[in-house]
Image (spheres, helix red, strand yellow):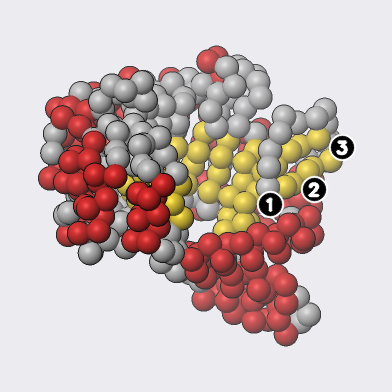
Amino acid sequence: MSDGDALRQAVLADPDEDTPRLIYADWLDENGQGDLAAFIRLQIEAVRADPFSVQVRNATKRAGALLEKYGAVWHARIREVIQGQLEDFVGVQVSNSLVSPLRDVVKVKARFERGFVGHVTLQPPVFVRAANGIFGAEPIQSLELIRFATPDDVPLEPVFEVPQLRHLRRLEFARPQQITHSITEEEYAAMLSCSHLSGLRDLSLRENVVPPPWLVDLFNGDQFPELQGLDIAEIPNLGPALVNAFARANHREIRRLNVTGVVFTSDEMRQLLTSRCLRHAEELRLGGAWLSGRAGPLSHINPGWVLPLERLVILDLKGQRLGNEGVGDILKQSAASALRWLGLSFNGLDSGVLRFFTESKHLSLNHLDVRGNNFTPSGIKALKARFPDAVIEV
């Protein structure tokens, strides 16, 4: 085994740590692969910097330019591994996008994270057959499964028997192409009983059909003990079940929650946001389907008091129709100092809210979304002056 291979193995053995990756980057520099070394360092820099800051944007842009130039070369390792385990297919195509597969060609989406392929999107049968090679080639910690056929043709149960799932920190299920392509109750049961997913931290089921009792069982039980993130966006009927689940999930600590498009009453929203398991939340996406002008549930309670602001970095309130005073109740809370990304699109705001931004000296936003409101050009100018280094969407 060469020094380079040994250093790559150190990355695979400890994928959560940056130090082995940076040591490998040093070796690459010394062995004529400076572009890949720079790419690794830039992606790590973007993760370590203040979220959404100028430093993050610059590092991401520079890394993206390198990926655009060398992506086909850097994807070769995982492409060859998959190709070697799928000999009955004509070829394997790996890139940073995914389209419907051509006949006898396996299409794989790969995403680089901290300099190595950390995420793959592929079909369940491909994953089952190639899992050993995939996890042996790259420090994969995130997997998205996508089906181009019905559940009867491409069942998920075999996926949950793959031991390599123990490496995963994030599991996503692509939105179904048709309603019949959603996850079945039997597959949900197999997922919940899968012992290989004990290290899972994030689960995305967005736009799938989720049985409400299953969601309650998930949070009230001891499955997925490391789970910290849940994405159930655009599943309108799950509001009451989630409130019920969180009310009895005191043994969990949920840091990332996306309930965009989920329907709640005001009382349910209050119960959700004051749940003990959300007390250390870092990301809350509470956007709703109230863009017709109807107020969202958060507008009927005092948002400044019910939101767990102390550690929130990302807060999306799209379509809640809070108005100037409701948003002001949030902005004036000193606990909101951790916020870096704030989404206030379609909230019925006008320049009257500007005083809350200017008076809240604790705010340090790097990204502000105020689309769909009623700001004058001078109001937008004032926001840009208040947060000169931020991306402001108008």
Secondary structure under the numbered disc 2 in the rendered image: helix
> On screen, 174 above or below 251?
above
Please report whichever mark, 3 or 2, sits nearer to the chain's N-terminal start. Answer: 2
Using the rendered view, name the quadrant where residue 387 is placed.
bottom left
Q: Are marks 3 and 1 in contact (CB under 8 Å)?
A: no
Q: Which residue is mark 2?
A: 84
Please report whichever mark, 3 or 1, sits nearer to the chain's N-terminal start. Answer: 3
- Callout 1 amino acid: Gly
Please report whichever mark, 2 or 1, sits nearer to the chain's N-terminal start. Answer: 2
- Callout 2 amino acid: Gly
- Residue 276 can be seen, yes or no: no
As measured in the structure, the alpha-carbon distance from the residue carrying label 3 to the one carrying label 1 is: 18 Å
Percent coordinates x, y for residue 115 in the rendering: 61, 64
Using the rendered view, name the quadrant where residue 100 is placed.
top right
Q: Which residue is mark 3?
A: 90
Q: Are marks 2 and 1 in contact (CB under 8 Å)?
A: yes
As measured in the structure, the alpha-carbon distance from the residue carrying label 2 to the one carrying label 1 is: 9 Å
Q: Residue at x 21, y 59 (%)?
A: 360
Mark 2 burial class by Cα count in 10 Å: few <14, some 14-19, many 20+: some
Q: Residue at x 62, y 41 (%)?
A: 121
Q: Of the residues tagged 3 and 1, which is closer to the observer?
A: 3
Secondary structure under the numbered disc 3 in the rendered image: loop
As measured in the structure, the alpha-carbon distance from the residue carrying label 3 to the one carrying label 2 is: 11 Å
Q: Which residue is mark 1?
A: 133
Mark 3 burial class by Cα count in 10 Å: few <14, some 14-19, many 20+: few
